[in-house]
Image: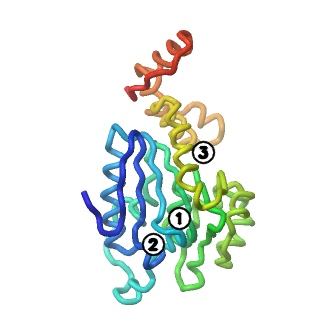
Amino acid sequence: MAYEFAIYEKKGRIATITINRPEVMNAIHPPATAELSEIWDDAIADDDIWVIILTGAGDKAFSAGNDLKYTAQKGMPSGPRPKGGFGGLTDRTDIWKPLIAAVNGFALGGGFELALACDIIIAAEHARFGLPEPRVGLAAAAGGVHRLPRQIPLKIAMGYMLTGKHMTAQEAHRWGIVNEVVPLKDLMPTAERWANEILECAPLSVRATKQCAMMGLGLPLELALARSYPALQQMIYSEDAKEGPRAFAEKRKPNWQAR
């Protein structure tokens, strides 16, 4: 299916979602969020897709966040929050497939919030991150004010959030938000390399690992250890849990089935 504001591609086990509004630095307005939400629904539900990459069109911006010109013309959105939140993603806290953000330029406001909602961030050397909402009378209410202080030291996060300052790709890497910084030409190959390294692992093991880590993150250790995790139970009783040791013993690559 063709989309107006996004490009959705599937190659093997990898789905790539590209925000496609380069004329406005991939800023997202409600119609784009509606499309992206539909795309996320499909990528999550497709059993043949095991890893998802999110990026932006062009070489200037991953996403400049909320389309402020559209907001100025149409006013702030009213009614219930769109399914999945901003960009169809920021409210989803139950995606157990791994998500990789390939940040090809500015990731500001909602764009940074989309990247923070991913598990791994690969950044082009010229990428910049920030939550500048207070500078335009808004707040990073699509998860930025909650995710950033959980992912870097509190005082550092507050410094960036209260001033709206930008963070370079190198600074983001130093603070541990970005996994790797590469030249722009290497951005998508690097994101795909990470995706393929994940695909070497059993998909149910990957999802169980992510679910245990994320659901146990805010708990005291003893409670996190004692908690029941559905994805972990599914993994334990899966065919892949038999295939892995068998392939190891037979000195061959495992044939993962995600069942």
CA neighbours of label 3 inside 10 A, class few (<14), some (14 to 19), many (20+) = few
Q: In which quarter of the image is the C terminus?
A: top left
Colour mapping = rainbow
Q: Which of marks 1 and 3 is in front?
A: 1
Q: Which residue is drawn at 41% across and 22% down?
A: 238
Residue at the disc numbered 1? 113
Left or right of 239? Residue 194 is right
CA neighbours of label 2 inside 10 A, class few (<14), some (14 to 19), many (20+) = many
**Sequence order check, earlier mark of 3 and 2:** 2
Secondary structure category for the residue under label 2: loop
* Residue 242 screen position, x and y as percent: 46, 15
Answer yes or no: do the residues labelled 1 and 2 have beta carbons within 8 Å?
Answer: no
Residue at the disc numbered 2? 26
* Residue 246 screen position, x and y as percent: 50, 12
Q: Which amino acid does label 1 sit on?
A: Glu
Residue at the disc numbered 3? 217
* Residue 43 screen position, x and y as percent: 35, 48
